């Protein structure tokens, strides 16, 4: 019987949150042939002590994509300004579409931290109530 390949999807609030919370296990899954996708729901354009705005967002996007490539996974970043993630119907639909497009059969959630992190966690917080109850097909 052939081994079933998993599709592992991890959401983070910022472009390095997935790396810190699940990078090691994602690398192991990828090494064993499973598909892994990290999604940052903000673009990371704030929070640096020297640069910000579009320049920082571009830098963090490049770093995230390079980190994903280094461990054999895909990394996507949404273009929502850091600190401006709102529980809009449009954003909820975007999150649900990403889950469905990746064909996730089941979801596990990590315990969220500060409010923005809770909003970015599709199993909890601002998006989770609707997303968790949606069929993931």
Image (cartoon, rainbow, N blue to C red):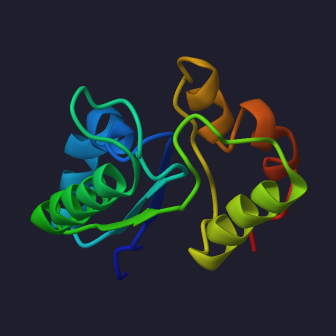
**Residue 22: % across, % down:** 32, 40
Please state the total of marks drawn on the protein image. 0
Name the image quarter holding the C terminus. Answer: bottom right
Compared with 33, 2 (above or below) is below
Q: Which of these two is toward me, 21 or 29?
A: 21
- Could you tell whether 112 is left or right of 127 in the image? left
Quarter where residue 44 is shown = top left
Q: Residue at x 54, y 61 (%)?
A: 79
Q: Which of these two is toward me, 104 or 81?
A: 81
Compared with 96, 22 (above or below) is above
**Residue 103: % across, % down:** 61, 75
- Could you tell whether 124 is left or right of 49 in the image? right
Compared with 110, 32 (above or below) is below
- Could you tell whether 135 is left or right of 116 in the image? right
Quarter where residue 59 is shown = bottom left
From this viewpoint, which residue is outermost toward the top? Answer: 114
Quarter where residue 71 is shown = bottom left
**Residue 101: % across, % down:** 63, 78
- Could you tell whether 19 is left or right of 102 in the image? left
From this viewpoint, which residue is outermost toward the bottom? Answer: 2
Q: Residue at x 26, y 40 (%)?
A: 51
Q: Residue at x 89, y 55 (%)?
A: 89
Compared with 89, 129 (above or below) is above
**Residue 1: % across, % down:** 37, 81
């Amino acid at each position: 019987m052939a081994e079933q390949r998993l599709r592992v999807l991890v959401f983070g609030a910022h472009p390095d949150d997935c790396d810190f919370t699940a990078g090691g296990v994602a690398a192991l899954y990828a090494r064993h042939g499973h598909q892994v996708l990290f999604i940052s729901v903000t673009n990371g354009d704030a929070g640096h002590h020297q640069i910000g705005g579009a320049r920082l967002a571009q830098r963090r996007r490049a770093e995230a994509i390079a980190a994903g490539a280094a461990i054999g996974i895909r990394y996507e970043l949404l273009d929502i300004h850091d600190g401006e993630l709102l529980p809009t119907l449009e954003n909820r639909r975007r999150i649900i579409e990403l889950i469905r497009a990746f064909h996730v059969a089941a979801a596990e959630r990590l315990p969220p931290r500060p409010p923005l992190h809770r909003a970015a966690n599709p199993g909890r917080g601002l998006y989770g109530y609707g997303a968790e109850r949606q069929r993931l097909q």
